[in-house]
């Protein structure tokens, strides 16, 4: 291998990209505006949650319960009739509907253990679970306070003081912006290496390279370093200017460590891109492959939903994806301020995955490239 | 119809077929044409000649309506081409064949299918179509290859197919841009005979042809010589010869160029002066053998492309390779360079066996392939420098070498231009320059001078002779120019994969007793073809050249006596035939690449499984640990209360504050509980006490859900405590809360996920399918067919969309079947509503992809753009996880207009909530609007002509 060839071929890749202003504009868009819109649009999980209450009791307690649901978690509760409830839930107007039965207060004080019905629209996935638990705890607390006052007994004095670490206000935009950045890093590195390889094949320039004194390893390395550099630059721009500057997300950990992680991740994803480029026979096929790979990478790597609640086989399978480890190390470094002593496992995993991907891609690339002359 | 065109039909002989006056054109700052005027009368023939980059192609593209007019007036077939109505009305009477080896063809379609596409676009009926296609295939000798994919044809055969496609309808005006470049002499003769026949039947038909072959130009009534966008001379061939005082058009051409334009042009009166300069024959036999091939064969499946070829080429020799198109020349060359492994036989270069891995050998050899294969994104200089570096030319020597080579090949002015902006001939010169930059010992050149103008060709040959004689460089090249063949030291004639004969030009001529080499070759070829015929039964239509043209009049249908008037269809009336034709072609392309459809269908099913099972917005099994500073039964009871739920699982207890910090920081704990000292005592006494809960907030959604569950469990624990405490004075007041998860009573992730995943998949996959559909044609060149055939932009887009809409619907049905059978999540509501919703949604999604395809300039950008702009809004802003109503800012706005939002409502409504049309009608309206809106926008953005 000749480093000079890798260098010059890599410069060629950079020139090619520089001559595509529209693509550059799209990249800038993805790493700035898309990140902003993705992070600022996210509501807190319980934010302006629509809740309706069928109050068939109309007692002191029931109106107390009604008043317990306050903004910003809840929209002011709407009193509805029992008949309206189904239609409103069908139309998706309310995520939660409480049904307080007649004589609720009386039954409660008489020790008859009345039942409140809480209807949850389970298709509203993000709100359904946390919301129902939250509503339950509100109800229990209100009832407890109410009964304790009535019985002239001190309510239990055990308070749960919850402190959220690393993101005290649970601002979803913090994490949302970083997740969108991670998604874009993956997407861009896959496209830049994979699609660019197919384009070279469609134009015959790869075949041309074969007649020259360069090796497939040199060609591949040149693509990895040059396109990696582009994505790294875009990531730095996004993280420093957009996420830290514009969105004012506090970054607690070491930036050099994070960028080292980005580089490792790029090594793996750009190898994956080349691998996909050798699998696809044409640009349309590559586009599809890209979607098929991107969606699980984005949805199952732990950025969108927690890994812990996925079935074990998905959890284990996703350990082979670079994104999973990248999400782990980004969370650790950027939010929890973790150092290498803490986040070395994802680093190691990324390095291994990158090496395997690179080796497999190189093997396929060698084979594909010799088959290209035919 | 404009009055002008009406009068043209009343007196057909009065107006010329085409009249261009004062035409000017510029690309950016470069002037391509300046004040060019020309006229083609009925039945007239005009040849455009001129050096590469003179503006010939631009002129033809303007006359065909493929390029937008900038300056001057272009009247064709009785009207102004700037008028879109007129252009659409007459385009079926114009045949335009663009430059380049089959750039307007569809590579994955077969020869017959390509012709079929064009015939259908021009609205030919089935019988007419069949007859014409058969006749054209027979006339060009393509009949045996009718079922071969166009992309697999050799360069020359692609050119022939391009011609057939241009001639498939019955045009009144032929505009051919270097139609015979790269076509072998035999086929070239057949081609011109075919044109003669067509003209005999349609005497009013006129034609304008750009050509680099002066012997062809000599047969035209008039010539127009262009240089640097200006008319240099115009007149009959005889007039030009007279004016320049030359006897041969090739010389006249060079004489017409201003002095100094080509180095030493004044002395180039004699074409290709090699023989005269080198009277003493060189004895190559004494030189070492540089190329040696022994019984080299190559098979592709059952087809033998190269059959036992043996060659010996000595050092310093110029060895020519001739033969009909597709006879195996390129394949042989590729095997010699190591690009293609041989099926059998051996080859050695420079005394070493050919080895694809041997980089040292590659450095001593230069190979120039037939198609342009340099980097379009690098300038001329950058391409040269890059190649010099890769071939390890010392850095210090590079600038000098680059300077010298651009001067040699006349590229000095273009040194900072991008190859994409160069005319074909100049690109070819650049390829040559690149091949020579590292001073190789052996040159393997595949049709190096195809499409290069005579002056440049001559300069190039001087260079070759120089290299061969002075520097002892061995040159192995293929060519279709007989003039060039004459200059070779030795020649091989190849046919059907075999080398028929090898010898010096003189030997070959004397063997066949012909005066010219061209005749000798044609004789030789006819002879083998005759024996081929006698060996195997072949339909008579594809006989040798003489019979072939004789059979033509019978097989070409008689043309109508008058030029057929343009069809009276209004411009905005869509033609189902043309939409069908485009759709059929697109579907064929998908069918040729079954992997694409399989990926779309199987891939989406796979994703549904993975995402359906994998994504859950609930939290389970979060790791928590307790820092118990109390160690009483009550503190243990509190911890056990958390453990009893499915949400948390317990990790080893926390030792101290530092341990807690470390474990939270590493992410191994999602929740840490601290129970203060004296907790048990305080609770027993009823004293206030506080339990601390530390939640990892790095993932806010997870933290939020975890906190809610924790609060719930805490309240539970308190209620239980209260019950146990107040056991004596009667039952404690308790409230029971019955939580009903509606639409998904078992709270299975699948039930909620399946209807939500379907809209995601059905946005991204169809959008990606169409995202490259148009831009791909732009990149590969076939978009020109939209500009010069009667198909309108809307028809084109609709046709492109149809196959993918069908594929998308099949996809939807498969997903529904899988949801029902595998996941047990059936459609509970109206199936009709779901299917109609899906149809509207797929129409929208495919139109969304088309939109990217029309305004983005490259496939790469289209793929990236579609990925960025479809995944983000679909996953984040469409109510997949968070209801659109609770979104904020920009996302909330996007969510409100994005189609996925509404299909998600329909899917959840029909799958989970058992709803029908009545309840969902508000979700249908936005979907109904999305398709026409997106398609309309795409239509507007799609250029109607090249600008």
Image (cartoon, coloured by chain):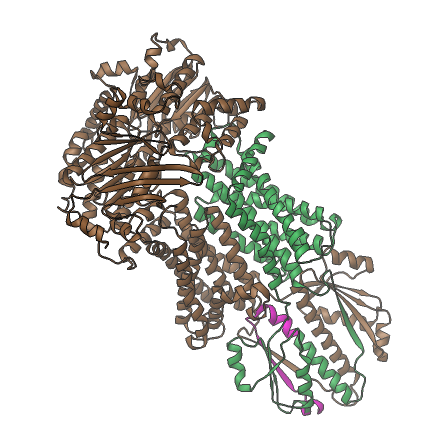
Looking at the image, can residue A313 be seen?
A: no
Q: x, y (%) of residue A129?
A: 62, 71
- Foreground: B714 or B544? B544
Image location of residue B308, percent across then percent down: 33, 24
Residue A115 vs B799, above or below: the answer is below
Residue B214 x/y as whole percent: 27, 26
| Residue B854 visible, this orientation | yes
- Of residue B240 and residue B279, the one placed in the foreground of this image is B240
Which of these two is toward me, B798 or A167? Answer: B798
Looking at the image, which is closer to me, B637 or B743? B743
Residue A58: name its quadrant.
bottom right
Q: Residue at x 57, y 56 (%)?
A: A34
Chain the render paints green: A
Residue B749 found in image quarter: bottom right
Task: Residue B37: give x, y in percent of width and height.
Answer: 29, 38
In the picture, measured across the screen, residue A240 lies left or right of residue B133, that is right
Q: State the residue at coordinates (51%, 50%).
A: B864
**Which residues are drawn in magenta?**
A106-133
Colour representing chain B: brown
Along the horizontal axis of the image, is B405 left or right of B710?
left
Q: Where A141 falls versus B615 (above or below)?
A: below
Residue, x 22% and y 24% (percent of image)? B522
- Is residue B304 shown above or below B685? above
Residue B357 drawn in magenta: no
In the image, taking residue A169 as reference, residue A78 lies left or right, namely left
Q: Quadrant of the N terminus of chain B?
A: bottom left
């Amino acid at each position: 291998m000749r480093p000079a060839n890798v260098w010059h071929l890599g410069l060629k890749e950079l020139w090619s990209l520089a001559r595509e202003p529209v693509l550059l504009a799209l990249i800038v868009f993805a790493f700035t505006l898309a990140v902003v819109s993705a992070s600022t649009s996210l509501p807190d999980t319980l934010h302006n949650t629509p809740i309706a209450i069928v109050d068939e009791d109309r007692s002191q307690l029931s109106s107390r319960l009604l008043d317990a649901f306050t903004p910003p978690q809840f929209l002011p509760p709407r009193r509805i009739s029992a008949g309206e409830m189904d239609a409103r839930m069908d139309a998706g107007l309310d995520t939660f509907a409480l049904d307080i039965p007649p004589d609720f207060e009386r039954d409660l004080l008489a020790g008859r253990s009345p039942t409140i019905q809480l209807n949850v629209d389970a298709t509203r996935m993000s709100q359904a679970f946390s919301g129902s638990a939250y509503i339950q705890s509100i109800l229990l607390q209100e009832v407890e306070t109410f009964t304790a006052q009535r019985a002239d007994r001190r309510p239990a004095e055990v308070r749960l003081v919850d402190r959220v670490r690393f993101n005290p206000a649970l601002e979803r935009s913090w994490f949302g912006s970083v997740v969108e950045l991670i998604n874009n890093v993956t997407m861009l590195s896959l496209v830049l290496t994979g699609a660019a390889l197919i384009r070279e094949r469609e134009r015959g320039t790869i075949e041309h390279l074969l007649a020259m004194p360069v090796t497939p390893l040199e060609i591949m390395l040149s693509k990895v370093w040059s396109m990696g550099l582009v994505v790294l630059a875009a990531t730095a721009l996004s993280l420093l200017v957009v996420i830290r500057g514009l969105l004012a997300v506090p970054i607690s950990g070491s930036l050099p460590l994070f960028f080292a992680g980005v580089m490792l991740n790029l090594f793996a994803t750009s190898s994956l891109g080349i691998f996909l480029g050798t699998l696809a026979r044409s640009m349309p096929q590559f586009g599809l492959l890209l979607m098929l790979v991107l969606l699980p990478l984005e949805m199952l790597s732990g950025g969108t939903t927690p890994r812990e609640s996925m079935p074990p086989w998905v959890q284990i399978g996703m350990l082979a994806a670079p994104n999973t480890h990248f999400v782990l190390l980004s969370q650790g470094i950027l939010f929890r301020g973790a150092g290498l002593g803490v986040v070395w496992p994802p680093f190691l995993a990324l390095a291994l995955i990158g090496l395997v991907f690179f080796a497999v891609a190189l093997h396929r690339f060698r084979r594909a490239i010799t088959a290209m002359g035919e | 119809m404009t009055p002008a065109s009406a009068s043209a039909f009343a007196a057909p002989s009065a107006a010329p077929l085409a009249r261009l006056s004062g035409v000017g054109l510029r690309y950016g700052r470069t002037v391509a044409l300046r004040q060019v005027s020309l006229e083609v009368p009925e039945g007239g023939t005009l040849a455009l000649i001129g050096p590469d980059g003179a503006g010939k192609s631009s002129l033809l593209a303007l006359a065909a309506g493929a390029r937008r007019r900038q300056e001057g007036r272009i009247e064709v077939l009785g009207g102004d081409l700037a008028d879109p109505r007129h252009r659409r009305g007459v385009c079926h009477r114009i045949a335009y064949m663009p430059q380049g080896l089959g750039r307007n063809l569809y590579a994955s379609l077969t020869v017959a299918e390509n012709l079929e596409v064009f015939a259908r676009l021009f609205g030919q009926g089935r019988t007419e179509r069949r007859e014409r296609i058969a006749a054209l295939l027979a006339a060009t000798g393509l009949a045996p290859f009718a079922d071969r994919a166009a992309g697999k044809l050799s360069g020359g055969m692609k050119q022939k197919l391009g011609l057939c496609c241009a001639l498939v309808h019955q045009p009144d005006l032929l505009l051919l841009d270097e139609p015979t470049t790269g076509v072998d002499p035999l086929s070239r003769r057949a081609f011109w005979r075919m044109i003669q026949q067509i003209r005999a039947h349609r005497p009013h038909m006129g034609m304008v042809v750009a050509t680099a072959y002066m012997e062809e130009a000599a047969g035209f009534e008039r010539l127009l010589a262009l240089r640097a966008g200006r008319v240099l001379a115009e007149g009959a061939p005889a007039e030009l010869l007279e004016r320049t005082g030359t006897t041969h058009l090739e010389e006249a051409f060079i004489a017409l160029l201003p002095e100094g334009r080509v180095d030493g042009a004044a002395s180039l009166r004699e074409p290709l002066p090699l023989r005269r300069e080198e009277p003493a024959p060189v004895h190559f036999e004494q030189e070492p053998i540089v190329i040696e091939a022994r019984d080299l064969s190559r098979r592709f499946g059952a087809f033998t492309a190269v059959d036992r070829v043996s060659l010996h080429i000595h050092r310093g020799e110029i060895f020519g390779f001739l033969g009909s198109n597709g006879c195996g020349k390129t394949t042989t060359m590729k095997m010699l360079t190591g690009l293609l492994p041989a099926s059998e036989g051996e080859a050695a270069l420079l005394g070493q066996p050919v080895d694809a891995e041997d980089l040292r050998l590659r450095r001593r050899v230069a190979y120039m392939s037939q198609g342009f294969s340099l980097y379009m994104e690098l300038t001329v200089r950058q391409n040269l420098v890059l190649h010099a570096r890769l071939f390890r030319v010392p850095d210090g020597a590079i600038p000098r070498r680059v300077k010298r080579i651009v001067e040699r090949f006349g590229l000095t002015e273009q040194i900072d231009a991008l190859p994409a902006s160069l005319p074909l001939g100049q690109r070819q010169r650049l390829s040559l320059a690149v091949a020579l930059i590292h001073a190789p010992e052996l040159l393997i050149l595949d049709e190096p001078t195809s499409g290069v103008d005579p002056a440049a060709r001559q300069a190039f040959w001087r260079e070759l002779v120089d290299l061969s004689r002075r520097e002892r460089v061995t040159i192995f090249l293929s060519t279709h120019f007989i003039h060039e063949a004459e200059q070779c030291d030795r020649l091989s004639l190849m046919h059907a994969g075999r080398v028929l004969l090898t010898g010096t030009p003189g030997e070959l001529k004397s063997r066949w007793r012909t005066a010219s080499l061209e005749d000798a070759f044609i004789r030789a070829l006819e002879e083998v073809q005759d024996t081929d015929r006698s060996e195997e039964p072949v339909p008579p239509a594809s006989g040798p050249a003489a019979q072939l043209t004789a059979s033509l009049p019978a097989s070409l249908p008689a043309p109508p006596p008058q030029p057929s008037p343009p069809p009276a269809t209004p411009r905005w009336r869509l033609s189902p035939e043309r939409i069908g034709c485009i759709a059929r072609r697109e579907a064929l392309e998908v069918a040729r690449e079954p992997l694409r459809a399989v990926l779309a269908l199987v891939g989406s099913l796979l994703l549904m499984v993975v995402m359906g099972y994998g994504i859950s917005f609930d939290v389970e099994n979060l790791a928590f640990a307790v820092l118990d500073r109390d160690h009483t039964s009550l503190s243990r009871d509190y911890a056990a209360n958390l453990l009893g739920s499915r949400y948390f699982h317990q990790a080893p207890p926390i030792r101290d504050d530092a341990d807690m910090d470390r474990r939270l920081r590493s992410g191994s704990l999602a929740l840490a509980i601290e129970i203060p000292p004296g907790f048990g005592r305080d609770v027993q006494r009823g004293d206030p006490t506080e339990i601390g809960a530390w939640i990892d907030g790095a993932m806010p959604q997870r933290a939020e859900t975890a906190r809610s569950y924790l609060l719930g469990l805490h309240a539970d624990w308190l209620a239980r405590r209260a019950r146990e405490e107040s056991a004596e004075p009667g039952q404690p007041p308790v409230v029971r809360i019955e939580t009903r998860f509606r639409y998904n009573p078992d709270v299975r992730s699948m039930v909620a996920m399946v209807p939500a995943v379907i809209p995601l998949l059905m946005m991204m996959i169809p959008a990606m399918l169409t995202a490259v559909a148009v831009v791909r044609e732009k990149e590969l060149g076939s978009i020109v067919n939209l500009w010069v055939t009667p198909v309108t932009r809307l028809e084109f887009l609709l046709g492109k969309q149809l196959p993918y809409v069908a594929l998308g619907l099949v996809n939807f049905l498969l997903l529904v079947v899988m949801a029902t059978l595998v996941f047990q999540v059936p459609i509970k509501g109206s199936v009709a509503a779901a299917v109609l919703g899906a149809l509207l949604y797929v129409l929208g999604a495919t139109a969304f992809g088309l939109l990217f395809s029309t305004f983005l300039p490259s496939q790469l950008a289209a793929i990236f753009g579609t990925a960025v702009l479809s995944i983000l809004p679909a996953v984040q802003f469409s109510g997949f996880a968070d209801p659109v109503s609770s979104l904020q800012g920009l996302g909330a706005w996007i969510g409100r207009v994005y189609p996925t939002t509404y299909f998600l409502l329909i899917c959840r409504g029909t799958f989970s909530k058992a709803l029908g049309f009545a309840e969902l009608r508000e979700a249908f309206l936005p979907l109904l609007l999305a398709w026409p809106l997106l398609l309309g926008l795409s239509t507007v953005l799609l250029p109607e002509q090249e600008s």
